[in-house]
Image: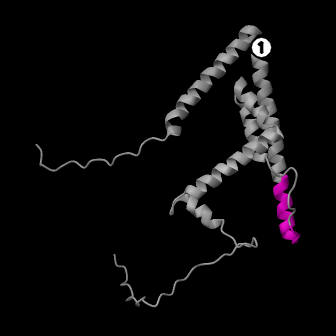
């Protein structure tokens, strides 16, 4: 028996982005290609050689991640020590950047497969790290500029505001308009 009331309709879903549409397909294609290449190498040599390649990738990736983590921790402790002692921080350290990309390269080496190993080895090269870092920085800045008010990108843009001399000004804006009328005090909340 119906009461004649209309069932509420769900709001229209926004269209799926191209990334959400093609990312699962790309991951599936990548996995199939990795397995196919491993089978080709196993047919050309032996399964033991493939096993040794995979183990070498895991060991090398672990060493790279451990070294990048130690370097990042050392840089952090040096920076904290400099700030606590009151000395000005160094403008640029030669090895202070690229730890994240180096860890990404190590992670790609740990993943089983020949394509991920090749990409991981590429990420260990300093020119590739610089190019990827510049591309990522430009992409993030472009996304932040395109972000509308009230979004997370807007919050980051507001947090990065600083004076032309480079000093960050912390503060709060208090508007004192003459047309503001005093409001009555709010009644207490009762339960």
x%, y% of residue 114? 72, 23
75 vs 177, left or right, is right
Is 175 situated left or right of 75 in this image? left
- Magenta stretch: dominant SS? helix
Residue lying at 77% horizontally and 24% vertically, measured from the top left = 55
Quarter holding the C terminus is bottom left
The residue drawn where x is 58% and y is 30% is 27
Q: Nearer the viewer, residue 69 or 13?
A: 13
Q: Is residue 119 left or right of residue 149?
A: right
Q: Split into 4 quadrants, where in the image is the N terminus?
A: top left
Q: Position of residue 143 (x, y in %)?
A: 59, 53
Q: In the image, is residue 168 above or below residue 145?
A: below
Q: Mark 1 points at which residue?
A: 48
121 drawn magenta = no
What's the residue at 66%, 22% (across, down)? 34
Q: Residues within 10 Å of mark 1 (few under 14, many from 20)?
A: few
Which corner quadrant of the image does residue 2 belong to? Answer: top left
Residue depicted at x 81% and y 52%? 73
Query: For this rendering, which residue is in front, 9 or 53?
Result: 9
Horizontal and vertical percent position of residue 177: 48, 87
Q: Give the range drawn in magenta.
A: 74-88
Compared across the picture, whether 25 is left or right of 40 comes to left
Q: Is mark 1 on a helix, strand or loop?
A: helix
Q: Where is residue 51 in the image (x, y as percent from the top left)?
A: 75, 18
| Residue 86 among those drawn in magenta | yes
Which of the 4 image quadrants contains residue 166? bottom right
């Amino acid at each position: 028996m119906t009461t004649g009331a209309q069932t509420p309709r769900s709001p229209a879903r926004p269209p799926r982005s191209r990334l959400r549409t093609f990312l699962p397909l790309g991951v599936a294609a990548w996995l199939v290609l990795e397995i196919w290449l491993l089978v080709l190498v196993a047919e050309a040599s032996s399964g033991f050689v493939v096993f040794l390649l995979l183990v070498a990738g895991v060991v090398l990736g672990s060493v790279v991640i451990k070294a990048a983590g130690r370097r990042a921790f050392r840089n952090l402790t040096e920076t904290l020590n400099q700030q606590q002692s009151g000395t000005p921080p160094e403008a640029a350290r030669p090895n202070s950047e690229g730890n994240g990309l180096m860890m990404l390269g190590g992670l790609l080496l740990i993943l089983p497969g020949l394509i991920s190993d090749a990409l991981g080895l590429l990420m260990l090269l300093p020119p590739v790290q610089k190019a990827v870092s510049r591309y990522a920085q430009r992409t993030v800045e472009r996304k932040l500029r395109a972000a509308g008010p009230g979004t997370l990108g807007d919050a980051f843009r507001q947090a990065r505001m600083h004076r032309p001399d480079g000093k960050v000004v912390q503060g709060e804006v208090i508007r004192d308009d003459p047309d503001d009328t005093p409001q009555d005090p709010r009644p207490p909340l009762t339960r």
